[in-house]
Image (tube, grey):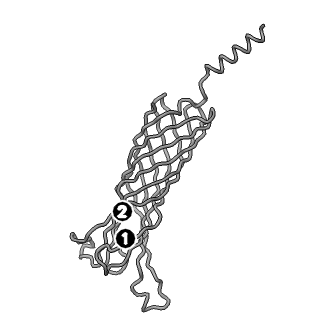
């Protein structure tokens, strides 16, 4: 009889005890802000390639710029076990990145970024009931704007009548971070994210005589977030 009572007591205790990291699961929404370093490489045909047998067929110029990134993210996390968590998320980021540089003598190319939509999955391990380490990765779609002037003015600026073109480019992102639950509903996080948008080309930027320009943008972000879990 005592054995049955003890077994029943243990079973009731297990049922009543919440999962180790129960406070880290559920629907969530967060605001994000942080620092980013964006890099853009531009490639154009070498105009002197025909005159020099040893010349390169293309000229590539790359440069980076740091700035502020901010956005929103929503997601859902579920526990696979007491400590292992998996989730899905989607979000949007905005950036003030803009960089101008010379590709060929007396020209100027300017690249700037707009919004970026993200969607992905993350998986993590709870080191305590309120502290989570995780890795994330998924799809990114960014807005990139490009302007090109083959004959810049004395102030090294794009002429007002030089058209700018923009395009939505697909890429991927990878990252890792740490999240802490301040209360059952309020949490904070810090994460690093790398995004690569691949290679794409802007055709006929100004007219048919202008060179085709290939762009390869990428960025590194360190983001802090504050969110609410439902």
Q: Quadrant of residue 81?
A: top right
In the image, 212: left or right of 55? left
CA separation, marks 1 and 2? 9 Å
SS for dot 2: strand
User: How many C-alpha atoms fall within 10 Å of the one at disc 2: few (<14), some, or many (≥20)?
Assistant: some
Q: Residue at x 74, y 13 (%)?
A: 6
User: How many C-alpha atoms fall within 10 Å of the one at disc 1: few (<14), some, or many (≥20)?
Assistant: some
Which circle's residue, 1 or 2, is located before the other in the chain? 2
- Judging depth in this view, the residue of 137 and 154 nearest the camera is 137
Give the quarter of the figure containing the C terminus.
top left
- Compared with 228, 50 (above or below) is below
In the image, 228: left or right of 134? left
Q: Position of residue 171 (x, y in %)?
A: 47, 58
User: What number of labels is visible?
Assistant: 2
* Residue, far top: 1
- Compared with 35, 230 (above or below) is above
Q: Residue at x 38, y 48 (%)?
A: 70
**Residue 85 numbered mark, or none:** none
Q: Which residue is mark 1?
A: 202
Q: Position of residue 153 (x, y in %)?
A: 24, 76
- Compared with 142, 216 (above or below) is below
Q: Which residue is mark 2?
A: 167
Q: Residue at x 43, y 87 (%)?
A: 49
Q: Quadrant of residue 98?
A: bottom left
In the image, 228: left or right of 122? left
Q: Are marks 1 and 2 in contact (CB under 8 Å)?
A: yes
- Judging depth in this view, the residue of 181 and 16 nearest the camera is 16
Q: Position of residue 95 (x, y in %)?
A: 36, 54
SS for dot 1: strand
């Amino acid at each position: 009889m005592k054995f049955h009572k003890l077994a029943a007591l243990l079973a009731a205790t297990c049922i009543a005890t919440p999962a180790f990291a129960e406070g880290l699961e559920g629907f969530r929404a967060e605001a994000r802000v942080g620092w980013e370093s964006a890099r853009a490489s531009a490639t154009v045909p070498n105009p002197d390639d025909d005159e020099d047998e040893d010349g390169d067929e293309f000229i590539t110029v790359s440069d980076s710029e740091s700035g502020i990134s901010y956005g929103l993210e929503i997601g859902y996390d579920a526990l696979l076990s007491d400590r292992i968590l998996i989730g899905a998320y989607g979000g949007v980021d905005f950036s003030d990145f803009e960089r101008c540089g010379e590709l060929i003598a007396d020209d100027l190319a300017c690249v700037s970024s707009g919004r970026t939509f993200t969607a992905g999955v993350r998986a993590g391990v709870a080191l305590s009931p309120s502290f989570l380490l995780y890795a994330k990765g998924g799809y990114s779609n960014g807005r990139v704007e490009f302007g090109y002037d083959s004959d810049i003015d004395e102030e090294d600026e794009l002429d007002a009548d030089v058209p700018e073109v923009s395009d939505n480019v697909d890429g991927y992102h990878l990252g890792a971070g740490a999240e802490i639950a301040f209360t059952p509903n309020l949490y904070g996080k810090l994460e690093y994210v790398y995004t690569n948008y691949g290679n794409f080309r802007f055709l006929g930027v100004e007219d048919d005589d202008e060179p085709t320009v290939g762009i390869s943008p990428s960025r590194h972000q360190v983001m802090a977030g504050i969110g609410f879990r439902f």
